[in-house]
Amino acid sequence: MSDVAIKTDAVIIGAGPVGLFAVFELGLLDISCHVLDILDKPGGQCAELYPEKPIYDIPAYPVISGQELTDRLLEQIEPFSPQIHLNQRVDSLRKTPEGTFVITTDDNLEIESTLIVIAAGGGSFTPKKPPIPGIDEYEGTSVFYSIKRMQEFRDKNILIVGGGDSALDWTLNLQPLARSMTLIHRRDAFRAAPDSVQKMRNLVEQDKMTFTLGQIRELHGANGQLEAVSVEGAEGLYQIECDTMLPFFGLTMKLGPVANWGLNLNENLVPVDTEMFQTSTPGIFAVGDINTYPGKLKLILSGFHETALMAQQAFRLVHPDEKLRFQYTTSSSSLQKKLGVK
């Protein structure tokens, strides 16, 4: 390798659930990792956007929050002592004459590695803002695009805007805490799970919340504190009183500097094969929501599976002179030793 100060076997870009589990799968095969993330804490979207939102499709967990899943994964990879670098945006990638990769971040951190694993989810993400005049004045005080601690919304008069899964999920999760709950959508049809929609309608029938049709045209309040909104409905303009508004219009995803690495791209996603999950550049892999292939499902579960297969090829790159032996953690004493099992 070259004279770069930090050298490792693998650099994982993204510290979300899939990136963290990649540390585990690589660690089992004696592959050391450094992990980079643009956020200020591990967990990716799970920790940043919905740390308290329940997730129902993680094997063996009937329900688990985004933050708890992150915490469990961090506990699971402790035996491998990964180096996690936060608040770091990967700006450039170059290949050395020896065939290794050198990553440079916006903080001038340089790491040289044998392989790169892109686990960056959808890339960098920002909420889509509704086109309402003056909304910037209320952001962070009474208008929020994500929820980190549900208790902060206790006893609030909440207005949720949107018709997707996030809008319906947070309507159901926050309704028991709220003083009043109103959901507004431009039409009486949703892009959310039918079960969630039915639960919302049941709450409306029980007079535990309100659902209304229309579009918000104006916000009313002072010094960043919302007091009411003007809504345009079928019968004209009317007002809804509220002190908290949560617009869920989706996220805008940007691939960022990865788009300039010379990889083949397909609609801002990275195509991979389904044997090794390698990109068009040998030695660079992509797992999780950032990749695409026939039959791809954007599930955390799918990303976990992808990292297991990726690790097999990574072993061949990092340990080319060693024979890869497939082992089960339940019966392999050497794997259990790595995990600290007594």
Image: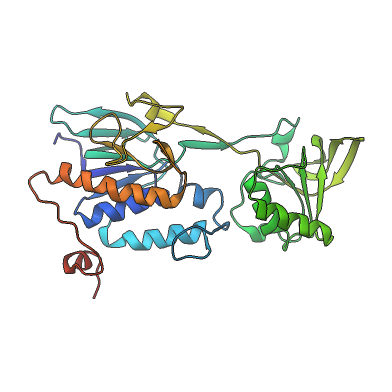
Residue 20 horizontal side relative to residue 101, left or right:
right
Between 253 and 195, the one nearer to me in the picture: 195
> How many callouts does the rendering have?
0
Q: Position of residue 320 (x, y in %)?
A: 11, 43
Residue 52 horizontal side relative to residue 249, left or right:
left
Q: Please name the residue shown 23% across and 39% down the image.
A: 115
Residue 52 figure quarter? bottom right
Task: In the displayed orientation, state which residue is furthest to the left.
Answer: 321
Q: Please name the residue shown 54% across and 55% down the image.
A: 51
Q: Please name the residue shown 25% across and 72% down the image.
A: 341
The way the protein has been coloured in the rendering is rainbow
**Is residue 60 at least partly visible in the picture?**
yes
Residue 4 figure quarter? top left
Task: In the displayed orientation, state which residue is furthest to the front.
Answer: 295
Between 105 and 171, the one nearer to me in the picture: 171
Residue 128 figure quarter? top right
Figure check: 253 above or below 76: above
